[in-house]
Image (cartoon, rainbow, N blue to C red):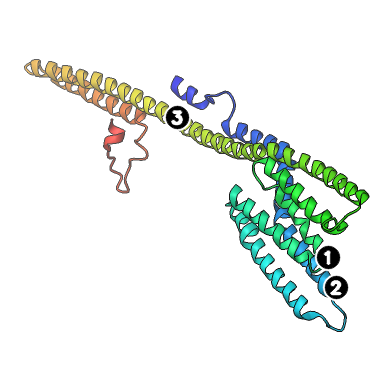
Amino acid sequence: MREAGIGERPFFGASESDIAEETAIANRSRLAWRNEQLRVWDVLQLVTPWLLLTTATVMYFVSALPAEGEGLWPDGAAVLGLVVVSALWVLFGHTLPMRRRTLRPVPAGVFFVGLMALCVTLMTYSDVFLVFTVAGFFHAYLLRPWLLGILGVLTTSVVLNGSVMHVWGAPTPDVLAEFLLIVTVQTAAIGVGIVLTARTEPEERRREELVDRLEAALHENAGLHAQLVAQARESGAQDERQRLAGEIHDTLAQGLAGIITQLQAAERSSSVAGQTEEHVARALRLARSSLTEARRGDPCRRSLQGSSGERTFPTRCAR
């Protein structure tokens, strides 16, 4: 049957589910390394400020203060208060917005300025907090546009190296030249990474979203293809039922026409002895033959037999 044959063949040459699976595997293998890098970078951005702040705080209270505990007040208390403020600043200005993906350019810039102010204040108590200042390099990657990121790297480098080299007083020309060289090289090296990240990371994240959408669309197309195949098969079965119903109708119509003809002939020959019985016998044979053909061609006959043995013909099958 032609319709059924069409329904059994895929409409688009290859199975949509196979295409979706192969495309998904290819995209995952091609982007897996990049996605892993993005995840590692996100974790690093979240963890680094806390790790550096904890390290600097432990180093300060272990090494910077006297072993006997002298000098814990007031410097130690002030540093502890600044550490608590820094922790709250990192939590509400950096960690929570990043986890919720709500970090915006203006709040990121405000957080960076506050971070540098806290680092400078902490380094007035001990140079060991330059370790915490390194967090400014990592946060500079989050500043947008990328020019602000480079400015953030420059600021962090000036604060960090200025405190280490003590250039805020009256530095010698050699120290100042060394300071400028270090700041320039450091800003250029880290700034290149910021420029590359600013250009490639958004594209990679958009590409990842597009791949997810493509996979979802392919799976949806596979479902639609399965529905089309099912509809084609159902259409073919419906056509077959209609064809069988037409054949049964024609057969029954011919049989009933023959029965009527024989009965009419029997009525006309009722006056002639023997001919009436012959016409009635022929009509009976035609009726039995028509009933046999109807039972043989009815696709619903077996399933429509009830528990009592009586056959019924619902509207769907009768049509």
Expressed as whole percent of the image width and height from the top left, the position of residue 81 reads 69, 73
Find out whether the residues at labels 1 and 2 contact each other: C-beta distance under 8 Å: yes
Q: CA distance from mark 1 to mark 2?
A: 8 Å
267 sits to left or right of 288: left
* Residue 23 position (above or below residue 142): above
Q: Which residue type carries mark 1?
A: Val
Tell which circle, 2 or 3, labels the residue nearer the N-terminal end.
Answer: 2
Residue named by callout 1: 128
Is 171 in front, or is 140? 171
- Residue 230, x across and y down, in percent: 46, 33
Name the kind of residue labelled 2 in the image.
Answer: Ala
In the picture, measured across the screen, residue 83 lies left or right of residue 18, that is right
Mark 3 and mark 1 in contact? Answer it, CB < 8 Å. no
Report helix, strand or loop for mark 3: helix
Of mark 3 and mark 1, the one earlier in the sequence is: 1
Gap in angstroms between the C-alphas marked 2 and 3: 83 Å
Q: Quadrant of residue 92?
A: bottom right
Q: Counting other residues with Cα less than 10 Å from the Cα at mark 2, is it few (<14), some (14-19), or many (20 or more)?
A: some
Secondary structure under tag 2 reads helix
Quarter of the figure with the N terminus? top left
Residue appearing at x 28%, y 32% in the figure: 318
* Residue 262 picture location, percent across and down: 17, 18
Callout 1: helix, strand or loop?
helix
**Residue placed most toward the observer, 185 or 177:** 177
| Residue at the extreme right | 174
| Residue labelled with disc 3 | 233
Crowding near the residue tagged with mark 1, few <14, some 14–19, many ≥20 C-alpha atoms within 10 Å: many
**At x 83% / y 47%, what residue is drawn?**
183
Q: Of the residues shown, which amino acid type is indicated by label 3?
A: Arg
298 vs 276, nearest the viewer = 298
What residue sits right under mark 2 in the picture? 64
